[in-house]
Image (tube, grey):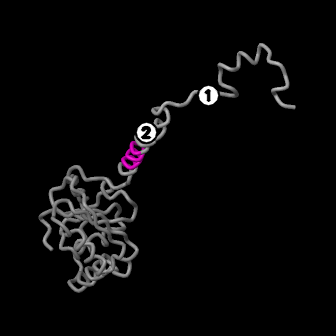
Amino acid sequence: MSENSYPEDEFDQIGRDLPAGVHRASKSTFSKVLPFLIVLIVMPLLAWGVVGLVKHNSGVQTPKAQSTSQAPKASPKKQTPSPSPSTEAKEEKTEEAKKEFDPSQAASIPVSVFNVDAGNGVAGEAAQKLINYGFTDSAASNRPDAVLDQTTVYYGSEDLAEAAKAVGEQLGISAVQLSPDIATEQGRIYVYIKSDYQQ
């Protein structure tokens, strides 16, 4: 049976002027483009925010000011008989042997070398010197925002003191400081190189 076999009624006449079936109005061009615009604007802002947050919380802090620490006052010593010169020499040699850094441990100590204002490639050359010595986990980068008075080696705990001195000796840096506020990453030594650095 076809539709034509039925006589027209009142409902057929209403439908001729209106669209047949389910009908939706077509979307405007703006509503079609809006999701893409949102992605193009929101995603870069979100990425910028995440990078800023990660950079802010990276764990490496910029030294703000050079703090001067006073040496602790020596407690009064009891008078003891002075040891013989040969005993003193033996004690000094023993103390020096204890304090010397073992270069075989250098590979296990990470070192970050930062170029503050020393010129192009200086931090990279310094890091390469350390790698050649045995500090194989040495890396260089720029930190022009660091505020310091001089080129300095920073370490965060006493157990790194001799390693930090060895880093200073290899690079010809005399300023070696214990500074847990700057050397925040456990077990890492930080070298900040300024224009006073002599290669």
Helix, strand or loop under label 1: loop
Asked whether 136 or 102 is in front, the reply is: 136
Q: Is residue 47 magenta?
A: yes
What range of the chain is rendered magenta? 44-53
- Inspect the image, locate mark 2, and give the three-letter code of the amino acid beneath it: Leu
The residue drawn where x is 23% and y is 71% is 168
Quarter that holds the N terminus = top right
At a point 27% along the width and 83% down the height, the residue shown is 93
Which residue is nearer to you in this view: 15 or 32?
15
Check disc 2 and report its element: helix, strand or loop.
helix
Q: Residue at x 46, y 33 (%)?
A: 29
* Crowd class of label 1 (few under 14; some 14 to 19; many from 20; radius 10 Å): few
| Residue 133 location (% of width, % of height) | 29, 81
Instruction: Tell me where residue 2 appears, x and y as whole percent.
Output: 84, 31
Q: Position of residue 6 (x, y in %)?
A: 85, 22
Q: Name the chief secondary structure element in magenta.
A: helix
- Identity, as a three-letter code, of the amino acid under mark 1: Arg
Q: Picture quarter containing residue 183?
A: bottom left
| Residue sticking out furthest to the right | 1
* Residue under numbered circle 2: 37
Determine whether 32 is above or below 44 in the image.
above
Residue 189, image quadrant: bottom left
Describe residue 192's horizontal placement relative to residue 27 as left or right: left
Residue bearing mark 1: 24
